[in-house]
Image (tube, grey):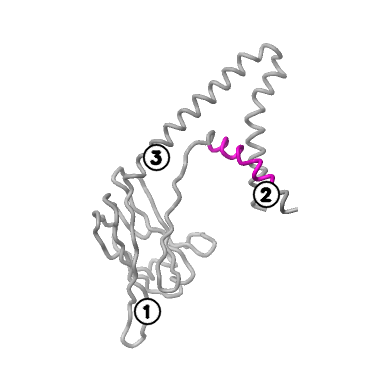
Amino acid sequence: MRFNFRLLNIIFKIFLLVAIPAILVIQLNQYGILPIIAYFQFLLLWAQAEIGLKQHILFSAQFDPSFTISSIKITDNKIGDVGRRLIIKNTSKNPAYNLNVGRVLDKDNEPLMPRYWTNKILNKPSFDLSPEESAHLCDIMDLGLILNHAFEVNYQNQFGDFKDFRLFFHGDTPIMVPQPLKEPGILLNTFRDISLLPLVIRIKLKKY
């Protein structure tokens, strides 16, 4: 189902790009040449603007911090293992600001309402982390929450851009999943999807 939606999405984008010059040709006949040229010049300027924006994002990404996460068992003398304490370390040369656990997500990546988890996670107030510095991120006091959910950690880089990464547990080991770099640019992403159309069609045909 998802594959078919992707294929239809690419075909729809092709239709939108072709529709305007096609309408100009039908409506204006030979007089539509100049508007068509202006249309493609507009697409060229749009693409150049998106390239500049992508370059800016790639440049600023080198100033983002990177982290490692470790956990310590929290035990009670009477009950035993009751939770996990998360320790975060900034392994980069870039500072991180306003770190905190912002959301808890279920197995379908849907966020839980805060009332279901805020009393189970002893979350520090937002704090900053210098390069090579470690800090106590939070205490997760519900083992069921650890096994079945992911945790979204929010922070800001030195430019004030809001970033996040997700954290889940494999056994007792915390696993970090950085958010992919978001590539802005509707037009360039559309061209990329169109270039992938032959591959998408071949994959679709192999299924049959």
Please name the residue shown 65% across and 50% down the image. Answer: 3
| Mark nearer the viewer, 1 or 3 | 3
Along the horizontal axis of the image, is 113 left or right of 12?
left
| Label 1 crowd (10 A; few <14 / some 14-19 / many >=20) | few
| Label 2 crowd (10 A; few <14 / some 14-19 / many >=20) | few
Magenta stretch contains residue 46: no
The first of marks 1 and 2 along the sequence is 1
- Residue 159: quadrant of the picture: top left
Q: CA distance from mark 1 to mark 3?
A: 42 Å
Residue at numbered disc 1: 82
Question: Which one is nearer the viewer's eye here, 142 or 38?
Answer: 38
Determine whether 32 is above or below 139 in the image: above
The part of the chain drawn in magenta is 189-203
Residue at numbered disc 3: 57
Along the horizontal axis of the image, is 200 left or right of 121?
right
Which residue lies most toward the right here?
208
Determine whether 15 is above or below 103 in the image: above
Overall secondary structure of the magenta section? helix
Residue at numbered disc 2: 203
Q: Secondary structure at mark 2?
A: helix
Q: Amino acid at mark 2?
A: Ile
| Mark nearer the viewer, 2 or 3 | 2
Which residue lies most toward the bottom here?
78
Q: Residue 208's x, y, as percent?
A: 75, 53
Q: Residue 106's x, y, as percent?
A: 50, 64
Q: Secondary structure at mark 1?
A: strand
Along the horizontal axis of the image, is 121 left or right of 25?
left
Question: Which one is nearer the viewer's eye here, 142 or 62?
Answer: 62
Question: Which one is nearer the viewer's eye here, 90 or 153?
Answer: 90
